[in-house]
Image (cartoon, rainbow, N blue to C red):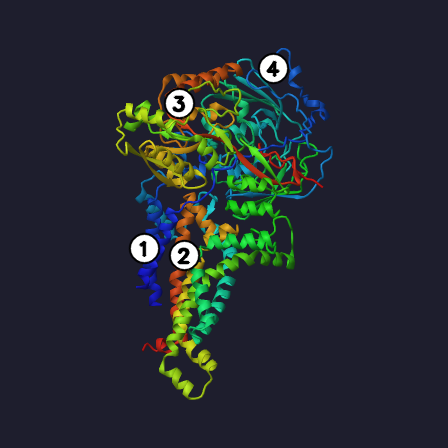
Amino acid sequence: MRRLRLLSAILALALIAVSCGDDDGDGSAPQPAAPAVEEPAADPEPAAESEPASEPEPAEEAEPAAEEPEPAAEEPAAEPEPEPEDTPDVAPVGGTLVIALSDDPGHFNPGITTGFNVHAVTGSMFNGLVELDDNANPHPDLAQWWEVSDDSTQYTFHLADGVRWHDGEPMTSADVKFTFENILLNYHSRTKGGLSSILESIDTPDDATVVFNFTQPYAALLQRLNSTEAPILPKHIYEGVDDVQTADANLTPVGTGPFKLESYDIDNEITLVRNDGYFKEGLPYLDRVVFRVIPDQNTQVLALEEGEVDYIWRVPGGEIERLSGDGSITLHNINSGPGGGFCIPTLTFNSEREVFSDLRVRQAIAHAVNREQILAQVIFGQGRVATGPINSQMAFAYTDDVTSYPHDVDRANALLDEAGYASDGTRFSIDLLVFSFGVFPKYAEVMRQNLAEVGIDVEVMPLDRSAFIPKVFTERDFDTNIISYCNNTDPSIGVARMYISSNIGDIPFSNGAAYVNPQIDELFDAAASTPDVARRGELYGEIQKILTAELPYLWLVETQFTAGSGANVRGLQANSGHVAETAFFEE
Amino acid sequence: MRRLIQAVPLVFGASVVTWILIHAAPGDPIVALAGEDGDAGYYAMMRERFGLDRPLHEQLFVYLGRLLQGDLGFSYRQNRSAVGVILDQLPATLLLMVPALAIATVIGISVGTLAAARKNSALDNTARTATLLGHAVPVFWLSQVLLLLFALRFDWFPVQGRNDARADYEGLRAVLDVAHHMVLPIVALVTVYVPPIMRVTRAAVIENLDEMYIRAARARGQSRRRVLIRHALPNAMLPIVTVIGSQIGFMFAGSVLVETVFAWPGLGRLLLSAILARDFAIITAMLLMLSVTIILMNLITDLVYSLLDPRVRHGT
């Protein structure tokens, strides 16, 4: 008898375990993006001058012979632009910054994952070749300056001088080559997906120079080289390791970054300590950065209010108004950062379902869904109604010259009548898959109400993340779903994946609508390989026009995240991985 | 000893059932493991790498084969053996659970006994109402109220964690710092543990107070108090021990809700995050350890029975 009880107890526990899902986050990027309202302070002082040997010259005066550094797509930030907006000449040194993290990272190898919790921590221990600002413009990081060939097939990076790994070994171009060839192109899902097919070779003419050669023009490389997309790892540590994914070295990170690992207490806290030999002179200011694992968002907010933590990546929408009146807390508006930026929660129509093969049905739903209501009630005004597949913050690519679908119940009803779905009570029923965490179920609730008004019965199915992904992308067993798709740092990275026909199938966060349009495939291809920014903008404009007319998805709102920090903390640059690099406590 | 041997197939069965359940649930750990935005080839490679592409029955055999060798599996997320991860988290959970259960036992038994002795008195009614409330109030809600009141409003206790993230205490100060952080979670846990102990104690003592031997003792002139403590309570102990024993058994699962709200780094949170990430090895290892603990606790409870009650000892 007791045995039976035990077995049933275990069963019950396992069942609860299986069915429960609570997490916080945001769909395709369940992780808060990092922000920075505050400008990166104190830019890296070119260490170059001190070392005449390797003469890194500013790009403007670069080799007259070679490619003119009129580098097409993205302006090479040749000279670090000091932007000492709110940073005093000498920031107070010292102090421990405590950052709340919603889950344990598990390891510290940023080259083998795109997971947010790993990158949130490793961003302070590793560097990329470049760092990106709020608007995804590149600035020097490990690479002090760079040149891009006219046709965007060759990128040459000149590394900063005197960079050393945390164990004292010098960092060289060999580390960059090794990291790409042996780690990033094999294991970093976005870098592998984006570069492996077009990157021809990586050359290292000398210790301080790295050359990337592409098989075709590629305009978005610089947006892929920050510490999130392409952290540089130490060759001398990982060379010869037979399994990078399970290597012990992943728990004892050796980076080049402003902080190094002091201790790791699983599920509790990760303590980083200042790297006194950091190559950016005078940085960092802080003695320590502690990442404290606090899974519950409300607890994070309370801990921030009490001053137990100094920074939280995301303030829940409902708390923003209350906290904005609290003088001891600074709120930061964020729309980009590690783990996904420029996000648009999007309704996917499964085009393989009969009902959605009719454009009028998709249009009717677009008119029936009240996106203003979603903006107000679901995300508390933190963002704006989306006009199409590209986020308005991505200025060079965005256009509002598209087909729009204002909230209009009559128009929706007329379209459904026209499509032959009689209006006696329920016209038809569909399911709507959403993540069971965060605000996703609220999106679904509003849409269920909206669609009921035009006679469409919606069955909302909340699933936890691990169950949602295979159901949508492997089994393709759904009518509609809501996912927050993030544009990331370039449309070729975050937008194309949802529309190109080669991306249909068993790939998480891919073309879930199973939308096929050869013209769109070509346009995305062309846009990714065109060096000229204006021309790229035109191509993406064209893409937005076609997609809003054909409506394979319905783009709901552009979300903006809000981070919170103690008012005495300045210089945070959470838009980049280096959230704490220039942070300091005001005295 | 015989019972111990009987327990072996039980544990085995439990582990197979939990393994199948968790694998039958939709989802796999690949995205949690590899991150997003990869291409199909990448995910296929990752699945192969971790043996997730093999048929389920094959995976089960691999699991059982390793289990027989004492290997409870490898955690994908933590990149090391599941047992190591679990043992690392165990002390933190015990640090909360043991004092909470001890306090709850003392409160539950004493209040329950008093309530029984003064059945239907004001004390009894208050205690009964309080336990009913304790039963009914969701513990995560209670935890948040505790936080709002005692951490935010009165500022007596810290909001989260096991220690102050900024301070670098040593020695006694470190101990006091941890103790300070333990107070609110323990209060929350005690309110969960007290009601069943108190109710069972009260019922069992009341039942015993009606027995003839109590009247006989009273007739011999023993005081009410002595009768209550020396005669009624010991005789009521068996069901109380059962309740406490089962709570100890489940103790090793930690408390998901309390640990989550207070950001206490224990087993409950480990289990939850493992489930969300489909970190199969951690889930199955924890459920296995849990079932072993519960079976052991049942054995121990039986032993305690025979110590407490000569009738059990002599098999009458």
The quadrant where residue A355 appears: top left
Residue A66, relative to residue A94: is it above or below? above
Percent position of residue B60, x then y: 33, 46
Q: Quadrant of the N terminus of chain A?
A: bottom left
Of A21 and A46, which appears nearest the observer?
Answer: A21
* Chain at numbered mark 3: A
* Residue depth check, mark 4 versus mark 3: number of the one nearer the observer: 3
Residue B312, relative to residue A11: is it above or below? below
Q: Quadrant of the C terminus of chain A?
A: top right
Q: Tag 3 or tag 4, which sits nearer the N-term? A: 4
Query: Marks 4/3: CA distance?
Result: 32 Å
Q: Which residue is mark 4?
A: A69
Q: Residues within 10 Å of mark 4 (few under 14, many from 20)?
A: many
Is disc 1 in contact with disc 4, using a CB cutoff of under 8 Å? no
Q: Which residue is mark 1?
A: B13
Residue extending furthest toward the top: A65
* Residue depth check, mark 3 versus mark 2: number of the one nearer the observer: 3
Circle 3 SS class:
loop
Q: Which residue is mark 3?
A: A500
Which amino acid type corresponds to the residue marked 1 in the rendered image?
Answer: Gly
Q: Which residue is mark 2?
A: B290
Is disc 3 in contact with disc 2, using a CB cutoff of under 8 Å? no
Circle 4 SS class:
loop
* Residue depth check, mark 2 versus mark 1: number of the one nearer the observer: 2
Work out whether disc 1 and disc 3 sit on a shared chain: no
Query: Marks 1/4: CA distance?
Result: 69 Å
* Residue depth check, mark 1 versus mark 3: number of the one nearer the observer: 3
Is disc 1 in contact with disc 3, using a CB cutoff of under 8 Å? no
